[in-house]
Image (spheres, helix red, strand yellow):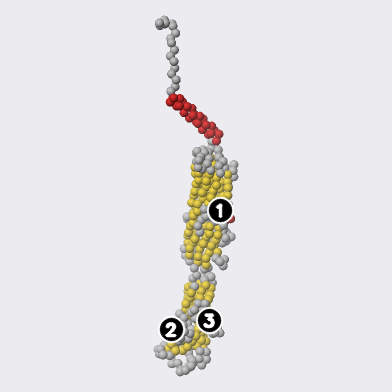
Amino acid sequence: MHGGPGAPQPQRAASAPTGAAALHRRAIAVIRALALLLVAALALFGSRSAHADTNCVVTTPVTLAFGTITNGSASVTNTTTTFTITCSTAALSLLATASVRACLGIGNGSGGSATQPTRSLRNATTDTMAFQLYTNATRSTIWGLTPGSNPGAQVIDLNYNVPLLTGGSGTVTVTIYGQVPAGQTLSAGSFSSSFAAADTTVRFAYNEVLLGTASPPPACTTPAGGGATGNKTVASGFPFTVTANVLPQCSTYVTTDMDFGSNAGAITGNIDRTSTIGLTCINRTAYTIGLDNGQHVLGTTTRRMQHATNPSYFIAYELYRDSGRSQRWGNTIGVDTVPGTGTGGTQTLTVYGRAPPTSGSLPAQGSYNDVITVNITY
């Protein structure tokens, strides 16, 4: 029976949630919890510095080789070499970044005691060649050793992400620009200058943040708490060597003729005369000077002058290295030639000649001559 209008109505039972709806509600709860954790993390850390470890390593540059430099060259000689600096930071957080400011310094090198106006290369006999190292391709900024000085160290900035699982790193390729100035008076030899660890310094400061973009430290020497997470020094530096070669060179040859004069009839006594050989060789150029046997040699050791119009007549003569006329001047290096070393200026050597007494029939009247070839080896 149904009750009247005032009678209470029967209650319908509520249905239980399905399995899918329950899982959906749980997922929403988890997402809300993660969001709350993220908000808490942001409130806790913001952009505060993290505390992972950052390190930098530098590769060794290949030799900065200028090759062959010409004495007194009218133009400069340029060359380059490269190396890399790689900085890495251990894992921080999902959105972490790091910023590194590194100062790469280069000192005087073993070839000299100064960085400016030029550095120096030296050879085995301590002769010098001026050169310079620069941070830019136009060769206008000298590369120095100390950060903030003049000339100063090269400043390199690296910025990179630091993922949570792997950590992060950044690499920069650095170029050293070298130049040998023009117009130098040079010595022959192999020149070099070594830049060991003490002459190649690496200092760096770094900032690490858990969220956002890390800002570069103010300087590579900025201490922890002073605008950087920390700073370090790479003890090994980036040692390298600079080389150049100057080849031996001789030029400006000047010779004078040897004139034995006039003689009436047979030569009855030694007629001694001299001539000269002049040459200019760059400093330290080792050379030897040899004389051939002329155009009318008898056998292998007797030089002769020939009559100008009658080729059947000859007058013997000889050329010597010493004023006593005891050391024949020949053309065999190390045996009968004259050695010397260039000074950069003109050098003059004396050739000592002798026409000995004639024997046999009288020489025909007239002029006699011979041509000697001077051989200079260096």
| Observer-nearest of 4 and 110 | 4
Q: Residue at x 47, y 88 (%)?
A: 316
User: Which amino acid type corresponds to the residue marked 3 in the rendered image?
Assistant: Arg
Label disc, if present, on residue 321 of the rendered structure = 3
User: Which amino acid type corresponds to the residue marked 1 in the rendered image?
Assistant: Gly
Percent coordinates x, y for residue 365 in the rendering: 44, 92
| Observer-nearest of 88 and 82 | 88
Against 195, is 266 above or below?
Answer: below
Percent coordinates x, y for residue 198 in the rendering: 58, 55
Residue that badge 1 annotates = 237
Q: Residue at x 53, y 57 (%)?
A: 240
Against 91, is 344 above or below?
Answer: below
Percent coordinates x, y for residue 80 in the rendering: 48, 57
Q: Residue furthest bottom?
A: 361
Residue that badge 2 annotates = 295
Task: Identify the image quadrant of residue 298.
Answer: bottom left
Which is nearer the N-term, disc 1 or disc 3?
Answer: 1
- Number of numbered discs visible in the structure rendering: 3
Crowding near the residue tagged with mark 3, few <14, some 14–19, many ≥20 C-alpha atoms within 10 Å: some
Percent coordinates x, y for residue 8 in the rendering: 44, 8
Asked whether residue 255 appears in the rendered view, the answer is no
Numbered disc 2: secondary structure: loop
- Rounded to the nearest angstrom, the CA distance separating label 2 from label 3 is 20 Å
The answer to whether mark 1 and mark 2 are in CB contact below 8 A is: no
| Observer-nearest of 357 and 272 | 357
Numbered disc 1: secondary structure: loop
Numbered disc 3: secondary structure: loop
Crowding near the residue tagged with mark 1, few <14, some 14–19, many ≥20 C-alpha atoms within 10 Å: many
Which is nearer the N-term, disc 1 or disc 2?
Answer: 1
Q: Residue at x 53, y 81 (%)?
A: 321
Which is nearer the N-term, disc 2 or disc 3?
Answer: 2
The answer to whether mark 1 and mark 3 are in CB contact below 8 A is: no
